[in-house]
Amino acid sequence: MSNYNPKSKIAEEFISNEEILETLEYAEKNKNNIQLIDEILKKARPKKTATGATCAGLTHREASVLLACDIPEKIEQIYKIAEEIKQAFYGNRIVIFAPLYLSNYCVNGCTYCPYHLKNKEIPRKKLTQDEVRAEVIALQDMGHKRLAIESGEDPVNNPIEYILECIKTIYSVKHKNGAIRRVNVNIAATTVENYRKLKEAGIGTYILFQETYHKESYLQLHPTGPKHDYAYHTEAMDRAMEGGIDDVGLGVLFGLERYKYEFAGLLMHAEHLEAVHGVGPHTISVPRLKRASDIDPTQFDNGIDDDTFAKITACIRLAVPYTGIIISTRESEEVRGRLLQMGVSQVSGGSRTSVGGYTTKDRPHDTEQFDVSDQRTLDEVVSWLMDYGHIPSFCTACYREGRTGDRFMSLCKSGQILNCCHPNALMTLTEYLTDYAGEETKKKGFSVIERELERIPNEKVKQIAEQNITDIKNSNRRDFRF
């Protein structure tokens, strides 16, 4: 008998191995059940409301049926609905961020990460506060407003006090018209007390990848170090919520385990957060295992091809319609372009995954956490997004206006968030174009803004946005927001 209980706070009960296996069996049995598949697709499709659009979302079982389905015309429908949902909730905006690596000191033995304790190939490095400032200035001079800080787990070299000091430093740096307005944090599972400290430091989203939900594989992949504790790691989001962090980000590292198993576990984790805290994941990341120092991805036999990757992403969008789906520069320009049509709503740009990588002219490879496939500059990524019909957004307004957690979710699920986000995206894009863009990107961008202003339905909002955009262009006034 299954011990599955989404309302439990015990890892093996809200991520039940028996429930996942039963789900995969059910999905395989029904993968060609056209009547059931059509019912699931109908449920997933966005419905128009007086305020915008709403989506029911799918259970992990329903979404697993769609993932297992191999009927070409049904797969095309999945892709089409994923794009419809993304447009309904997020419009044509794509949020842009960059990772900032603080330290690669780590005490864990993770077999897929080059930071593992026994790797003697990489030099260990930890940024001083002066180096953090220099990195932040380099990122601001590119045009970034939102960072995701990354660090290995090492209680001696990277204690929570160091992370908090780095956050304070990042927020303090104001160079020319630049400012980092949102710091998301991707660090190891920690205590409720430490999550409270992160919340008090003004972080945006707390991100923690599960890597794999398969407990047996998890223990083998994390043979040594504090990360070996499966339950402590898997229950981290509950402690983060208890510590007052209401925006959390999930993710698995596709390629470590069977993708259908990971997919079901990921959605069960999202359902658990909804059931216990009333707030699902603010973001879901979809990284794939990549080559790095001392790491050969071909040693792992669960790699997924681009078509499967696209299908996973689209099915996540159908299952968790409100979440921000993140794709990083691990993936190539071609793959990122394709997944933007499958529901992705956040991308990194101009990323460097090495400690101190932004202040060097040439990309350093000796301390990279993984090979960066998309090595274009931020300006090239911004220009490319606009070529695809997207609005590159540097907006951080929701977090700074208190629209987080259940408040954000209620606005997002009702379709009302677009009333703020669309004009905010245009104003932050204006900042980027005015302060940082190349001439060609600038010309293209102002044309996009002119066109998109006409799409704002509320006349008063439109007038305010137009005035703010004029002020940004003609003065040093910045940071307007709805």
Image: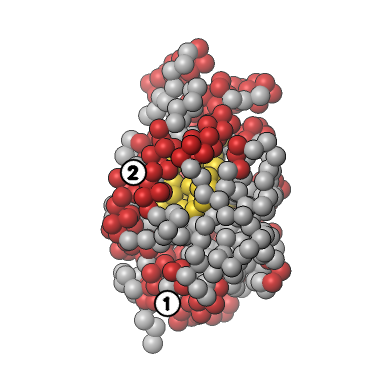
Q: Secondary structure at mark 2?
A: loop
Q: Residues within 10 Å of mark 1 (few under 14, many from 20)?
A: many
Determine the residue positioned at 45% across, 60% down. 154
Residue 313 seen: no
Determine the residue positioned at 41% across, 52% down. 206
Q: Which residue is mark 2?
A: 201
**Please, what is the three-letter code of the amino acid marked with disc 1?**
Ser
> Percent position (x, y) of residue 67?
58, 66
Q: Secondary structure at mark 1?
A: loop
Residue nearest the viewer, comparing 163 with 332: 163
- Residue lying furthest bottom in this view? 1
Q: Which residue is mark 1?
A: 16
Q: Which badge, 2 or 1, comes first in the chain's sequence?
A: 1
Residue nearest the viewer, comparing 294 with 330: 294
Query: Which color scheme is applied?
Result: secondary structure
> Percent position (x, y) of residue 302?
65, 71
